[in-house]
Amino acid sequence: MEKLRIFVSSVQKELENERIAITELVSSDPFLDRHVKTILFEDLPASASSTEAVYLMALRSSDIYIGILGFKYGRKGPDGLSATHREYAEAKRLGMLTFFFVKGDNSQDARRDEEMKALFYEIRDEQHGQVYKRFTHYQSLKSSVRDVLLIELGKEGFRPTSEETAIAEKTIAQSSDFDSRLIERADITELDKVLCRRFVAASTGIPENDLGEGSIQKTLMNRGLIWQNDAIHPTAAGLLLLGKNPEAFFLRFALQLMHSEGKNGVNPLIARIYGMPCLWLSSVHSNSSNATCVTQPESKASPRWKS
């Protein structure tokens, strides 16, 4: 069976983090990575065709439409529709399997653009609407999208092993609310450029000298280490892992590194580092096929190293 192609539709700028979260979900889940391919407009190759023609062609070659709704409707085209609305209309015309994920609870619905309110009303119409689920955080979005994909793959006879399920659940759970907290009083200049480049090179296998600033930022965002609001800010995890001076923002903290080697099985190596700059990255990550850093505040005195 060819990979299940899922087309991700949303306002790009407002929901960039959520779009990345779905890509990260698939790439970090061994079962989904084997069976699913995400289709995002920004990842499509350059084309001489119009923008609209390109994304509609990608949509028509997909199996599932996943729409993410936020608060902005998006720029309208000559037909009076935003790209997201146009993509949904085409998916509906094609009879494509469609799922929507709506950011924010119902107390926030009044904040949505009037056009977005109308689109949301169309989507949740009891007779002609679509299945939708609300989310408030990208972690819950990832869990919900994973549940949908597992059901659809299960219909084709594909199911994850218990080990693959454990890896996927642990990967999603490892990012706590503390990890993903946006540190708005810090900007990207608080991160050590050398460590950022070293981390991305080790994570992607791309030589350090071949990495551009754009690809470094994209990987850091993909890993939840930076986040974009009006500007780019580090998350708590990013600041602790790659910050020049994380103690200026957190008085006490701990880092937990989960390290696994090879493709068969997970051999965890857990180290807790207290109040230390992460100069160990080169030695740890150079031998790591899959490394995830989990951070948490530390409330009591602890030894400098503990294994």
Image (cartoon, rainbow, N blue to C red):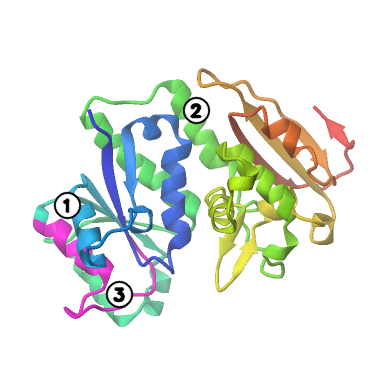
Amino acid type, callout 3: Met
Q: Position of residue 127 (x, y in %)?
A: 11, 61
Other-residue count near label 2 (Cα within 10 Å), few / some / many at <14 / 14–19 / ≥20: few
Q: Which mark is residue 100?
A: none
Report the side of 18 relative to 73 (left or right): right
Report which quarter residue 117 is drawn in: bottom left
Q: Amino acid at mark 2?
A: Ala
Query: Residues in magenta?
Result: 68-93
Please name the residue that numbered disc 2 is placed on: 166
Task: Work out whether residue 124 can be spotted.
Answer: no
How far is the residue under mark 2 from the one under mark 3?
Answer: 37 Å
Q: Is residue 133 above or below residue 154?
A: below
Residue 66 in view in this figure:
yes
Q: Residue at x 19, y 63 (%)?
A: 53
Q: Give the amino acid at mark 1.
A: Arg
Q: Earlier in the sequence, mark 2 or mark 3?
A: 3
Nearer to us: label 1 or label 2: 1
Q: Which residue is mark 1?
A: 60
In the picture, residue 26 is in which quadrant? top left
Residue receiving disc 3: 116
Q: From the viewer's perspective, is residue 153 above or below residue 106?
A: above
Instruction: Report crowding for label 1: few under 14, some 14 to 19, many 20 or more residues within 10 A (C-alpha).
Output: some
Q: Secondary structure at mark 2?
A: helix
User: Along the line of sight, which residue is nearer the eye, 139 or 277?
Assistant: 277
Identify the residue at horizontal 61%, vertical 40% (top origin): 207
Identify the mark nearer the N-term, 1 or 2.
1
Q: Residues within 10 Å of mark 3 (few under 14, many from 20)?
A: many
In front: label 3 or label 1: 1
**Element on which disc 1 rests:** helix
Q: Earlier in the sequence, mark 3 or mark 1?
A: 1
Which residue corresponds to the image point at 55% horizontal and 58% vertical from the top-left? Answer: 214
